[in-house]
Amino acid sequence: MSELHIRRAVPTDIDAILRFWTVAAEGTSVTDDHAGVARLLARDPEALLLAEHDGSLAGTVIAGYDGWRCSLYRLAVHPERRRQGIATALLEAAGQRFRALGGRRADAMVLEANERARHAWKAGGYHRQDQWRRWVKPL
């Protein structure tokens, strides 16, 4: 995919990213707002990766690293661009970031009902870990 370019997000991308997620992402998150994404970029400017195809936003992934865990969130590809290797390219870029930081294992948060996402994660070499469940508490 020579037309595909992966880069880190910058603050001026935030509004476009939020619009993109309403079209391409499965579900919403409590942090899907300008302030939440701005905090992410301020804390870790390299974490939010964007895939652009011919100058248009085609995909995203958040590749967060806290010094201990490598965490993946918001892997999303535009519906018209799916099955073209964009998710695989984003996951490879995230893996390169994690390896450079000394990461040992990447964990992904995937909605249980998101059947379509399973193909992308499996293609990227990920597998479901059934013995764990996420516990949450709204703040």
Image (cartoon, rainbow, N blue to C red):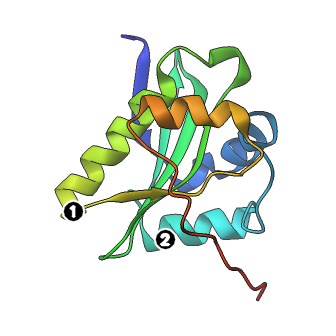
Looking at the rendered structure, the secondary structure element under dot 1 is helix
Residue 106's x, y, as percent?
37, 57
Q: Amino acid at mark 1?
A: Leu
**Residue under the point 37% across and 75% down:** 66
Q: Is residue 91 above or below residue 123?
A: below
Q: Which residue is mark 2?
A: 42
Q: Nearer the viewer, residue 73 or 130?
A: 130
Q: Nearer the viewer, residue 111 or 44?
A: 111
Q: Is residue 89 left or right of residue 133?
A: left
Q: Give the position of the C terminus as an image quadrant.
A: bottom right
**Residue under the point 70% across and 70% down:** 35
Residue 28's x, y, as percent?
80, 55
Residue 51's x, y, as percent?
49, 31
Q: Is residue 27 above or below residue 92?
A: below
Q: Which residue is mark 1?
A: 101
What is the distance, in whole Å, between disc 1 and disc 2 at their CAs? 18 Å
In this figure, what is the number of numbered marks?
Answer: 2
Q: Is residue 123 above or below residue 132?
A: above
Q: Are marks 1 and 2 in contact (CB under 8 Å)?
A: no
Looking at the rendered structure, the secondary structure element under dot 2 is helix
Q: Nearer the viewer, residue 85 or 57?
A: 85
Q: Is residue 94 left or right of residue 104?
A: right
Q: Give the position of the N terminus as an image quadrant.
A: top left
Q: Quadrant of residue 25?
A: top right
Q: Residue furthest bottom?
A: 139
Q: Is residue 107 left or right of residue 117?
A: left
Specify few, some or many for label 2: CA neighbours under 10 Å numbering under 14, 14-19, or 20 or more: few
Specify few, some or many for label 1: CA neighbours under 10 Å numbering under 14, 14-19, or 20 or more: some
Q: Amino acid at mark 2?
A: Ala
